[in-house]
Image (cartoon, rainbow, N blue to C red):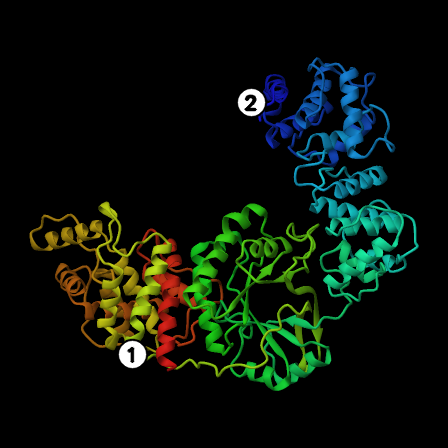
Amino acid sequence: MRDPMVLRAQRFVNSVYGSRIGTTVEETGETDWATLYALTRALQYELGITALSDNFGPTTLSTLTAKYPELNADTVPSPDFCRIIQSGLYCKGYDGGDLDGTYGERVQAAVTKLKTDMGLEQAFPGADLTPKVFKALLTMDSYVLGTSGARQVREVQQWLNGRYLNRQDFFVVACDGRVSRDLARALVLGTQYELGMADGTANGNFGPGTQSALKAHPVRQGDKGVYVQLFSAGMVVNRRPVALTDTFDSYLAAAVRSFQSFVALPATGEGDFATFASLLASYGDQSRQGKACDTIAKVTPARAATLKAAGITYVGRYLTNPSATSLPEKAIQPGELQVFAQQGLRCFPIYQTVNNDASDFDYVAGRTAGYAAVNAALDHGFKKGTRIFFAVDFDAIDAEITASVLPHFKGIKEAMADSGHPYEIGVYGSRNVCAQVGAAGYSTASFVADMSPGFDGNAGRPLPEDWAYDQFVIRTLGSGDAQLEVDVDVASGRDTGQGSFNRPRPAVPDVALDEGQVPALRADLARYMRSIGRPDLGGVGSDARLYTNAQAVEAIQDQDGLITELSHTYTMRKALIQTAVYWAMRDYSLADQATDQQVADHHLTGSGQVRDSHTGIGQISGFDAIQAWNHCIGWGYTTGDRRDPAKDADLWSVWQQLSKDNTFSVRTAALVHLWGVRGRPGGQLPPGDRVTTPRSMRLDLAEFEITELLRRYRAWDPDVEAQTHQSLAVYQIFEKYNSIARNA
């Protein structure tokens, strides 16, 4: 809402300081960071600081403290200095007077009210503006109860401010009734101060020193004092139905028992260290035992014995490995699940490729992940109803969750529905990610990444109600061949993994498509393509696609014998060829057709302006086809005469075959993939990684390798990244039906 006083503040800072501080702000009448940054720079200018910054940091604070430890009517050095204060008050919604440069009664009343709202009326009474309060004034924090805030939380915020603001590293926290990372840190700082930590040592981190000292201060029913206040504040921050109190009464004890039961601690009703720790840090008491773990190490019989000796029953293992060379045991290994069954352990599957940045998440990637996880789970032998935990392995903020993570899980859910709901969907991530994905209806249980208390998604957030596993510490268990490193997890019992498994589907060669499955294949592809905005009939205008979904599937079905033969000859999954051809056909447009005509005119009449184009059902250019054939002839993959793409006769001959002969196009598509294996330009591999073995394909390519080969196939396309990204789900759909056929 446009506020005339905020507008006055913006006009003031622009007119008086714009040229001095090197920036102006948009005069909107709305408080924003840009305005507060400009006021901060104006203050720095008045203090004589030459290196101006948006940050009200240590230099600004120490300079202000040294020059003006208390600002009031007698100490404000100039009218413009006072106008900075008045402008800050406007931006916070307080009456700063008439922007007259006078620290008068209205300014004094506003500062007094501000400090009262902050909880400082007793610690710092009166109308003097102190440096830390000035720092807080130039932030977007609110000190009145917000619409989504809770009164009990605000009481904790005000209490912490009033008790600890005089300490070196404690700064005013918002008093809006909303839990935040700053509030969680402030609570730990308060605990450290009460434990006797000196300024400069207390840092807001719940580390070994803090933990050791806190063990000497349990609280229980009948106790009174500051540790009860800190403990009850922790209960409030964790959204338990209590209020800040200095008396541990029966009501608080009952709430503690409820909390302990929820987080899987002994329900004693006492504020012991383990309970206190769970209130102060997401990982809680890291010395406690867990009945679950997750690991990137293969569970051998010896390691299974190590896990059982450590009291672990549930073990999280990964369905796939995104890389062929790094972490070779990350994915479940052949025969491993039989060890689980024989040793009485239970496995809960995790699906993760990269998933450590917001750019890895969107609806299309979610569809791909859903299909890929189902295929992998079926390959390993997980029974229907198993819950797969899909990873969000980074600290996603709210905007990223809304824009990227939730659409991703929508895609997962729809892929799972297309697959007939064989598995439940779980989510791995921060508390906030898990809670929001669950609230959206995209998951049925959470695997919480609580080892990172500094995550914005963990700090000050309660454990999600649907939590199944709570990851809290890394440990190395066992020794020798029985040794393995694990992330230890608390298990709630909401998920129990699987202790028996279907027979795994081995990496056997592909066979002919099951004709009876083709209608379902066609329907799955149509649903997916429609979901990404590619209708069955191809669109309109110059970008209209000329091949329908049914025509593309029919063309692939017609070439199934050849595709199967090529798969066997080159140890290549049929889905690589099928995906390349399907995507090429569905992407072929009126504009592409016009370009093809230009090529024909060029070679036949000399009138066309284009010498070569990507043509035929594989969308392969004459140049690329000649290159692929020449390379593969040289490597012994195939036989034939080498051709020269610089010669029009050779180029035209090959181009015509691609354009008119579907069999030639399909065979060439396989050779393009082989060229991709051997390093066709257009891909980018991490140092030390490679796509596959030097001589041939493998049937067990890692997901990254599949992505890279599809990318290299379309290396010519200026939109190759988006095209590859969207085509990965198509690969998984074809692989679904190839798997059905080869495992019949």
- What amino acid type is highlighted by mark number 2? Glu
Q: Hey, which quadrant is residue 174 in on the image?
A: top right
Tell me the crowding category of disc 1: few under 14, some 14 to 19, or many 20 or more residues within 10 angstroms, Cα based: some
Q: Mark 2 points at which residue?
A: 27
The percent coordinates of residue 490 (x first, y second) are: 70, 67
Alpha carbons under labels 1 and 2: distance apart: 68 Å
Q: Residue at x 20, y 50 (%)?
A: 590
Tag count in the figure?
2
Residue 530 in view here: yes
Examine the rendered structure and indicate whether residue 74 appears above or below residue 32: above
Closest to the observer, 229 or 306:
229
Q: Give me the residue at 43% from left, 63% from top.
A: 415
Q: Residue type at mark 1: give it.
A: Ala
Q: Which corner quadrant of the image does residue 493 belong to? A: bottom right
Front label number (1 vs 2): 1
Image position of 592 with respect to 650: above or below? above
Name the quadrant of the C terminus: bottom left
Q: Residue at x 37, y 71 (%)?
A: 735
Looking at marks 1 and 2 on the same chain, the residue that comes earlier in the sequence is marked by: 2
Between 437 and 192, which is closer to the camera in this rendering? 437
Element carrying mark 1? loop
User: In the rendered view, does 405 fall on the left or right side of 457?
Assistant: left
For the point 59% across and 48% down, which residue is it? 397
Is residue 159 shown left or right of residue 443? right
Foreground residue, 335 or 54?
335
Q: Mark 1 points at which residue?
A: 512
Residue 60 in sight from this viewpoint? no
Q: Is mark 2 on a helix, strand or loop?
A: loop
